[in-house]
Image (tube, grey):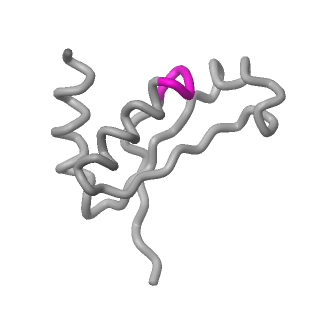
Amino acid sequence: MSEDLIVIRVFNNEVDAGMAQQLLRDAGLKSFTFKDDAGGMEPQLQLSGGVRLVISRADAEQAEMLLASFISE
């Protein structure tokens, strides 16, 4: 079964993306982070491409509401 996945946010670093991902996980939403940093050997590459937080399209609306409150705090 294939779900439609969308990028819901792009973060400047892995720490911020991880905190947002944990917030979604605590709410019962499954999400993933993707980054192109040469397997962690070139973390500065995160600055140009960012760390993408990906979630299923079906959960996007709920995730947007959660992330809006997280980012505004």
Residue 2 in the image: state x and y as whole percent: 46, 78
Residue 44, placed above or below residue 20 = above
The answer to which image quadrant residue 58 occupies is bottom left
> In the picture provided, is 9 more to the left or to the right than 48?
left
Point 44% across, 49% down: residue: 54
Q: Is residue 38 above or below residue 62?
A: above
| Residue 31 image position (x, y, % from top left) | 41, 52
Query: Residue 68's x, y, as percent?
Result: 20, 29
Q: How many marks?
A: 0
Q: On the rendered image, what quadrant is the N terminus found in?
A: bottom left
Relative to residue 50, is residue 45 drawn left or right? right
Q: Is residue 34 left or right of residue 41?
A: left
**Vertically, is 19 above or below 21?**
above
Q: Is residue 51 above or below residue 26?
A: above
Q: Residue at x 19, y 50 (%)?
A: 61
Residue 16, by quadrant, is top left
Residue at 26%, 22% in the rendered image: 71
Quarter that holds the C terminus? top left
**In the rendered structure, which segment of residues is drawn in magenta?**
11-15
Q: Which residue: 59% across, 44% down?
A: 34
Q: Is residue 25 magenta?
A: no
In the image, taking residue 18 as reference, residue 20 lies left or right, namely left
Residue 18 percent across, percent down from the top left:
47, 34
- Judge whether residue 13 is colored magenta: yes
Asked where in the image residue 5 lies, by quadrant, the reply is bottom left
- Residue lying farthest bottom? 1
